[in-house]
Amino acid sequence: MAKVILSRKNTFLNILLLISENQVYGQSRKGFDWLSPPGAMSGTYIISYPSQASSMVRFSSMTAALSVAEMLGSIGISSKIKWENDVFVDECKISGILSEEVKNSRDNSYVLVGIGINCNIDTNITGFENYSSILSKTGKKLEMKVLWETLSSRILVNFGELFSSGFEGICERINKALLWRGRSASFSSHKNGTTIGILVKIDEFGRAILRENNGNETPCSHGSLKLNA
């Protein structure tokens, strides 16, 4: 059962956080069912913003990923942002994000931002060998409510910046923490097949830029990115 644990607002938006202590009907970006184990932080932010800023909604997952990375940094965990909606620690996933826009009225709209974070989970147990968690990095169980408070502060600041000033500043900070930047990666999409090259950056449109062997820098979107062996 979900419950509300906080509500905050600033000049540009309102946020409401719903959390679930035992998520059994979650859904991944590709539509697969998702089950959160005990010790996971599972929540959805309902973010109300001015309708005139709707062009910025497509950057919601990346903005949330930056917020998670900053929250982790506040407790001494260095992390990287994997395009476009995951956070990794030491090449292992610690968090995933999924966002969806909901049209409400002429003046205001909503975006739903679902966030899952491996918090008090022992990653030594079977099935979690390729994941990271706050417990595995700090060696202790932390109070989730405090972590939600810290994350919510970053969500409010970063989404406030996104909807008032645009994606440019957010993009610069994401690129500083971009996973696999400068390494060979492959981007696969149903429309354009597979592109292979060096991951250069995320551009102002939120696309992953790969530099191919011929020197061309190719923008990639609507697909999946993986590191080449």
Image (cartoon, rainbow, N blue to C red):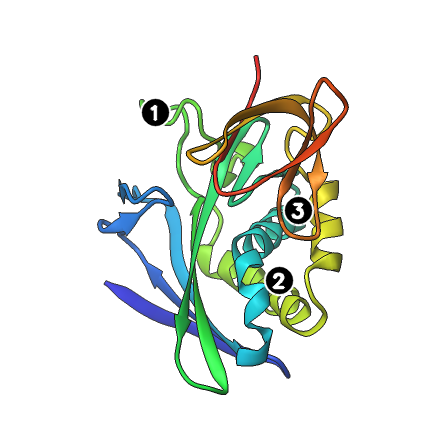
State if disc 3 and disc 1 touch (CB < 8 Å).
no
As drawn, the label of residue 180 is none
Q: Residues within 10 Å of mark 2 (few under 14, many from 20)?
A: many
Q: Give the alpha-carbon distance from disc 1 to disc 2, as whole Å.
A: 31 Å
Q: Quadrant of the N terminus?
A: bottom left
Query: In the figure, residue 220 lies in which quadrant?
Result: top right
The residues tagged by marks 1 and 3 sit, at their Cα atoms, a distance apart of 25 Å
Q: CA distance from mark 2 to mark 3?
A: 11 Å
Q: Quadrant of residue 218?
A: top right
**Placement of 110 over or under 150, stated as above or below:** below
**Residue carrying label 1:** 125
Instruction: Provide residue 177's location: percent of width, then percent of height.
Output: 69, 40
Q: Earlier in the sequence, mark 2 or mark 3?
A: 3
Residue visible at 40% across and 75% down? 103
Label 2 SS? helix
The residue under label 1 is which amino acid type? Ile
Residue, disc 3? 73
